[in-house]
Image (cartoon, grey):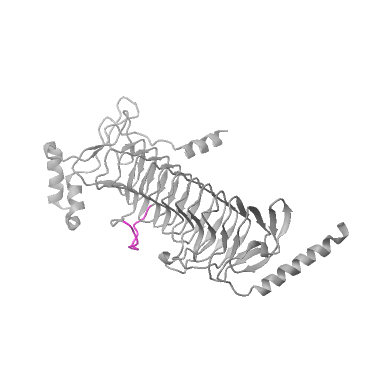
Amino acid sequence: MTGNMPHANAHRTVIALMFCLLSGGASSAPQSIMDLPLQAEGDQQWRLPAGEYRGSFSIDQAMTLTCAPDAVFQGQGEGNGLVIRAPNVQVQGCTFLDWGHDLTAMNAAVFIHPAGQGAVVRANRMQGQGFGIWVDGTRDVSLIDNRIQGDPGLRSQDRGNGIHLYAVRGARIIGNQIRDTRDGIYIDTSNGNLLQGNTLEDLRYGVHYMFANDNQLLGNTTRRTRTGYALMQSRQLTVIGNRSEQDQNYGILMNYITYSTLRDNFVSDVRDGSTGDTMITGAEGKALFIYNSLFNRIEGNRFERSAVGIHLTAGSEDNRIAGNAFVHNQRQVKYVATRLQEWSADGRGNYWSDYLGWDRNSDGLGDVAYEPNDNVDRLLWLYPQVRLLMNSPGVELLRWVQRAFPVMKSPGVMDSHPLMQAPIQPLQRNVAQEDAS
């Protein structure tokens, strides 16, 4: 048997080459993966040898498919690269190129059918114009350590999303790297899913939630997107330990989010975007934008070096905002409403880098409340043309009058217990502990 092994391997190689040459055109219906020259490696364990396999393929039985390093699915610009139609399928180590880009038909490198419960798609590389991975109406799917690259030559609205979940439960989206697609990860009408440790760069939205409840968003990073985390029309989200770096318009956008937790997130250098491709107007480079969102806990976050630290509007009330750090933002707070907002809890507020108060008893809390905005600020927000008079004697007189006669002061944001030092986030604590050891 040992002496015949080289001949067997040569025979398989010839079959693979013949298949690649004969499959010159992509057919409309996916071909069965079993038509490829698979090599058995155990019970329902198959290996796809090196080669370029043209067309669209489907997996219709439980199996583990492992690709050799140079095994490439070449979609030739039509249909899906691979369709998973059976439960308990694993696909790993494959390369998918140039599948279809018909967004209406949901063309994807890997399309997971509702029957594909428990599918695992791991350590694959995908590069094309359509969707990277589309998961459709199934559950308990794992998408792990995949690299998905879109086409930067297309307008963002003409590209597919990197990962798209529709009506999905129990998915685990972990450690993926996505860039140059439309949105990095889009979650639509999908509950009870985990997104953790993904890196999302050069996109429209890094993470985009719509009508998705009871989801966890942990330890992800967005860079150079037009909105890092677009959280919309959802409740009971757990958003912890994420980073937004050099995004435009918004670091974290909350639009009608309720009963959710935002904790230990880091947002920095959010810039004013001028693309016009935003869901809500007024994107001046906001680290955190809270729109029509209630009953949320926003604690332990750091928002720094952005045009606006936090903007609260449209009836966003009854949120617990405490223990955060607002550091060197051009404008720390933007709030236009007529109700007092107290931004402290249990005797502790937030850290404000522009706070000028004092701490005479050294308890770590300022002795004077922090009030970031006054009536003149509200006047400027309501009538932007008044900015021409920003430094005029008339505006300075208005500020003096409202300080001298507090009875004229209208309700706004107040932090009655501002912190004298910025809280240390978990990542900073871990680094400090490593340095000490």
In the displayed orientation, state which residue is furthest to the top. 361
Please provide the residue range marked out in magenta. Answer: 270-279
Q: Does residue 320 appear left or right of residue 35 in this picture?
A: left
Which quarter of the figure has residue 238?
top left
* Nearest to the observer: residue 333 or residue 63: 63
Residue at image coords 68%, 64%: 36
Q: On the rendered image, what quadrant is the N terminus found in? A: bottom right
* Nearest to the observer: residue 315 or residue 422: 315
Asked if the stretch drawn in magenta spans residue 272, the answer is yes
Which quarter of the figure has residue 214?
top left
Q: Main secondary structure of the magenta part?
A: loop
Q: On the rendered image, what quadrant is the C terminus found in? A: top right
Asked if the stretch drawn in magenta spans residue 58, the answer is no
How far across and how far down the image is residue 383, in percent? 17, 55
How far across and how far down the image is residue 335, in percent? 24, 46
Residue at image coords 42%, 44%: 266
How far across and how far down the image is residue 299, in percent? 37, 37
* Nearest to the observer: residue 205 or residue 251: 205
Which quarter of the figure has residue 31?
bottom right
Up-down relation of residue 193 to residue 200 (above or below): above
How far across and how far down the image is residue 402, in percent? 14, 41
Up-down relation of residue 153 to residue 343 (above or below): below
* Nearest to the observer: residue 59 or residue 270: 59
In this rendering, the count of numbered labels is 0
